[in-house]
Image (cartoon, rainbow, N blue to C red):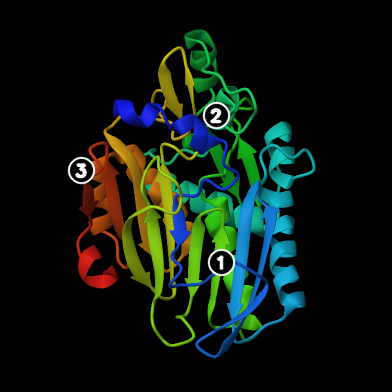
Amino acid sequence: MPAATKNIYKKLIKLTFSAMLILCLTACSFSGPFGAENGAEKLSKTDFVLDTVSTVTLYGAGDEALLERCFQLCREYELIFSRTDSRSELYALNHSGGMAVSDELLELITLARDYAELSHGAFDFTLGAVSEMYGFSSDSPRAPSDAELAAAMEHTGWEKVSIDGNIVTLIDPGAVLDLGAIAKGYIADRVAELLLENGVDSAIINLGGNVLCLGSRPDGEDFTVGLQYPFEDVSRTIANIRVRDMSVVTSGVYQRCFEQDGVFYHHILDPVTGRPCENGLLAVSVVSPRSADCDALSTVCFVLGLEDGLELVDSLEDVYAVFITEDYGLHYSKGFEDALF
């Protein structure tokens, strides 16, 4: 990685909200809970859920009670999908080795398995024990020893998960499922459904940088989403894109990272080695109507690397991506520039 970036990442990792994506001021302002934009009433709420700072902004419809329901829905899903919360359903599954699960957990595990199969294992949701050793979100992250890593990798592999009806079984009892690479996208989609059911057709759902723009701006124009310049303050963008009824999700090396003995470690792990991917990429941003797809594909494409990642995105309908390489070059999938600039 560029030497200059190593000197500034420590400051960035301390930010509570080090999201890869920010909404430009032309899209909305989060200066207060009430306001107006082009004559449309705006209502916004920010809270700490899903282990990150999240904001939901409504335009022209909805009320404070609906906003609170959005955040309550996030908390309910967190108690299903969290790997670390001992009260969660996923935690119970990981510690039981197999059980009947809720429709929501079944749906998300099935979707995760679909992406694992599509990517030939580049998306591996059984890396929970490996990522836990690194402790990227803890106060004292560390790189595991070769022996520790080898022992944990023995229990990974998405094929070790069996689904029979609503019974999910860990064929390897030592496997630990981690849905962190897809859960926020899935939850953003559910929040959008809640808003639509309650008459809101213009909104921004920002779950810690997983951004879903519902409809368009009150004036009928597209929302503008800024892609953060890697390793810089969140206010500095490397590109601005236009979206409506689209989600934008980024996987970047600086979102959760640390340095140990002069070596830089980030949270996007290679399912083959269990170590952070080293493929010349700094970030991948994916744009598509469904946020769960963006969430999963941003990780998949990062792990696959520039060439294979672009090939995959180009094979999918209504999916766009931009890859940022270590030289800060921008590499777009087919149709990206025509559709989003």
Helix, strand or loop at mark 2? helix
Real-space Cα separation, disc 1 to disc 3, in angstroms: 31 Å
Asked whether 52 or 148 is in front, the reply is 52
Residue 180 visible at all: yes
Amino acid type at image mark 1 = Ile
Real-space Cα separation, disc 3 to disc 2, in angstroms: 26 Å
Eye-nearest disc, 1 or 3 = 1
Which residue does the numbered mark 1 point to in the structure image? 205
Check whether the beta carbons of the residues at disc 1 and disc 2 lie within 8 A of each other.
no
Asked whether 162 or 24 is in front, the reply is 24
Asked whether 30 or 227 is in front, the reply is 30
Pointer 1 or 2: first along the chain: 2
Which residue does the numbered mark 2 point to in the structure image? 131
Amino acid type at image mark 3 = Glu
Up the image or down, 269 lies above or below 63; here it is above
* The image quarter in which residue 240 lies: bottom left
